[in-house]
Image (cartoon, rainbow, N blue to C red):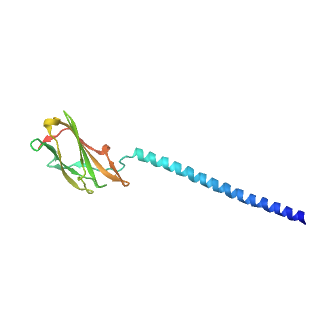
Amino acid sequence: MWISALKLMTNWEKMKKKGITPLIATALLISFAVAVGVVVMNFGRAEVEDQAQCAIDIGLKLAQIGGQEQLCYDAGKKALSFTLENGVNIKVEGLIVNIIGTQKAETSEMNEAKMTKAGTYLGQVNYDSALGGEIRQVKISPRVLLYDQEQVCVEQALVKEQVRNC
């Protein structure tokens, strides 16, 4: 009787071990699969963000009145004046205006230059041609909120090399 009870105990312990081993193996495989999935998704998201800096077409352009683009320099006021029209896809949260002259380049951040979808903005940037020289290029870059992050879309900037006098 003792021998059969001892055999029963031994068989019971073997059955316990046989039942737990597959559960542990399954849990480990599931954990490994989840970890690999997380790593792959993070690499994929980083790749998409690197390639798509400004994935939306903003549609920013200079307004035209009477067939003439509204960008000019007033030497008396020492200011560059412009009128911009936003596209219908996204709001613009600000502008960065780069003016490259023959003597020096200047950058102005315009945080107040907010435009709704299909909105218009009348702007003015101070620039002294006596110090910076004749304007060779004006670059206006929009700043937008994409995925709750502020981004400057330099690839969609307006670039003009011919600036008329006001």
| Residue 143 seen in the current view | yes
Q: Is 68 situated left or right of 147 in this image?
A: left
Identify the residue at horizontal 15%, vertical 36% (top origin): 131
Q: Which residue is at 13% across, 36% downward?
A: 130
Residue 153, percent from left and from top: 32, 46
Closer-to-camera residue (12/30): 12
**Image x and y of residue 96, in percent:** 26, 46
How many discs appear?
0
Q: Quadrant of the rendered structure where residue 74 is?
A: top left
**Residue 114, percent from left and from top:** 25, 54
Query: Where is residue 38 drawn, in percent x and y?
Result: 53, 51
- Judged from this view, the residue extending furthest toward the bottom is 1
Q: In the orientation shown, which residue stands out farthest toward the right? A: 1
Q: Quadrant of the C terminus?
A: top left
Which quarter of the rendered picture does the N terminus lie within?
A: bottom right
Quadrant assignment, res 107: top left
In-image side of 150 versus 7 (left or right): left
Does residue 28 appear to the left or right of 3 in the view shown? left
The answer to whether residue 69 shows anywhere in this view is no
In the displayed structure, 11 sits above or below 138; it is below
Q: Residue furthest left?
A: 76
Residue 99 to residue 36: above or below: above
Relative to 138, 20 lies left or right? right
- Given residues 138 and 126, the one toward you in this image is 126
Residue at left 25%, top 51%? Answer: 111
Question: Which residue is the extreme one toward the front?
Answer: 2
Residue at 33% x, 49% y: name it: 151
Between residue 11 and residue 159, name the one nearer to us.
11
